[in-house]
Image: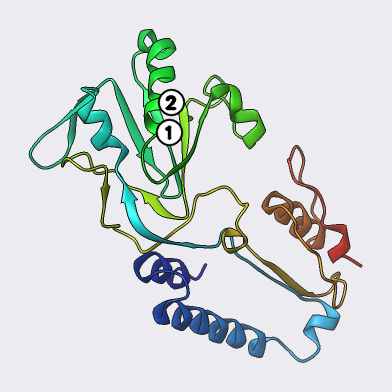
Amino acid sequence: HFLCADSFQHLHGPRSPEAYWALEYVDHCMGRVLAALPTGALERDTTVVVVSDHGFLPSDQEIRVNVRLRQLGLLKVDAEGRITESRARFVTNHGAGCVYVLDPADRPSLVDDLRSELAALAGVRGVWGVSDYAGLGLPVPDDNPMMGDLVLEAAMGYAFGDEARGDDHLGAPRYRGNHGHRPDHPDIGAFFLAAGVGVRRCAELGTIMSRDVAPTVAHLLQLKLDDVEGKLVTDALV
């Protein structure tokens, strides 16, 4: 796992000079791996698979949902910005995030009020409630208690932060590049590259799902994965 390609794009943004340096470094490391293989290994007994788990989008502004929740009287913070009391709070995943209403008695009315309130914030692309989760491929809180009561997505050029202090729900971003958005922008997509034994030569796959990578690699290793959501990427295989 080459972390620098992720870290440098977070810190400096995608397509920045630092990001291109990180990608060149990863390419150099992969070259060392390939150079270390015995002659003829890719034709005889070796398969190389290179994957990423996400792309990146640039962030020029940070959306601070917890500032708005504090202004609505739903949470309190101390002088250092730590949340000390809350009826609702937002947890960021940068390109998206969840609102959690902490008292079950509050949920029916508060979730509806917050959905319209937060949808009106600048930089918020969309807000979804629990009834929408299946269409997003997400579990509901009854099946996974880590899920929130609302899911928010940031618009292009924005990302979410955790900050709860201050008077403005927009501010300078902590990170210049982020991910976590829905995969409908080409720059947020990941990639899959494979070569060697069991792999079809010169095949162009088009779009595949990330969940299909594990069963495909397991097949190449002659292993069987039971009870998985993904399927074999048959177009990649001989």
Residue 213 in the figure: left or right of residue 219: left
| Residue displayed at 80% across by 62% down | 220
Is residue 146 shown to the viewer in this render?
Answer: no
Residue 115 numbered tag: 2
Is the C-beta separation of discs 2 and 1 under 8 Å? Answer: yes
The residue to which callout 1 is attached is 119
Amino acid carrying label 1: it is: Ala
Residue 89 in the figure: left or right of residue 9: left
Residue farthest to the right, as pictured: 238
Residue 133 on image: x %, y %: 59, 29
Which structural element holds mark 2? helix
- Please identify the quarter of the rendering in which residue 175 is found: bottom left
| Residue displayed at 54% across by 87% down | 28
- Please identify the quarter of the rendering in which residue 21 is found: bottom left
Q: Residues within 10 Å of mark 2 (few under 14, many from 20)?
A: some
Q: Is residue 234 above or below residue 136?
A: below
Q: Is residue 199 above or below residue 144?
A: below
Residue 109 in the figure: left or right of residue 32: left
Q: Which is more toward the observer, 44 or 92?
A: 92
Residue 81 on image: x %, y %: 15, 40
| Residue displayed at 36% across by 64% down | 176
- Please identify the quarter of the rendering in which residue 112 is found: top left
